[in-house]
Image: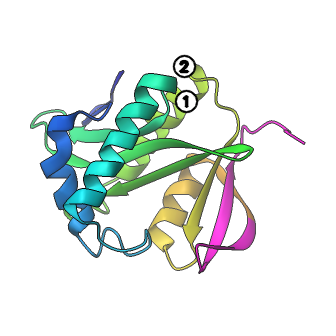
Amino acid sequence: MEIKTDRLLIRYFRESDLNQYCQLVADSDVMRFLGGSQTKEEAGAYLEEMIGLHSSSGLGRYIVELRNTQTMVGICGFRPADLYVDFGYRYAKKFWRQGIGLEAGLAVRQYGLECLNLHNMEAIVATDNTGSVRVLDHMGFKYRENIEYEGADSLRFRDSIERDLS
């Protein structure tokens, strides 16, 4: 799987991504709302989980890199969750506020709709994570409710193209 946008290449994880991914998730600012920094072992386990999801279902978070340099800027994609598919992302701090989250998010969302037939996406973000709230809003996700998620006050958003699963 490869998705190309004007600036980005979005693709499946590879084992060779481990070092760059470790740098991303070792940053406490990047991981502030995601449970804190990860060790190399935790990052490696996550990478293996994503590779497994890719091969079994096409789901998973995907590597987002700059097309012109192949520099990893973050990850974006899907994880299975209860009745909905979790949509999530994280990006290196030096790439914040450049529109990359929105650009990648829209492309990945479209891929989910057209190629994976996902019409049941949701995202959960910490209440204080105003940057992610803005990205989801610009992508067309709609606020649904305040919840507690993993011990934190959070907001649940659902894709505006969702279908009723009840």
Mark 1 nearby-residue class (10 Å; few <14, some 14–19, many ≥20): many
Circle 1 is placed at which residue position? Answer: 112
Q: Quadrant of the C terminus?
A: top right
Cα–Cα span, label 1 and label 2: 6 Å
**Does the magenta run of residues contain 163?**
yes
What x and y, as percent, mark residue 158? 69, 51
Which residue is painted at 44% across and 73% down in the image? 33
Which residue is painted at 16% across and 60% down in the image? 23
Question: Which numbered dot is residue 115?
Answer: 2
**Does the magenta run of residues contain 38?**
no
What x and y, as percent, mark residue 89? 42, 52
Residue 150 visible from this viewpoint: yes
Mark 2 nearby-residue class (10 Å; few <14, some 14–19, many ≥20): few
Which residue is painted at 23% across and 33% down in the image? 14
What x and y, as percent, mark residue 116? 57, 23
Q: Which residues are magenta?
A: 145-166
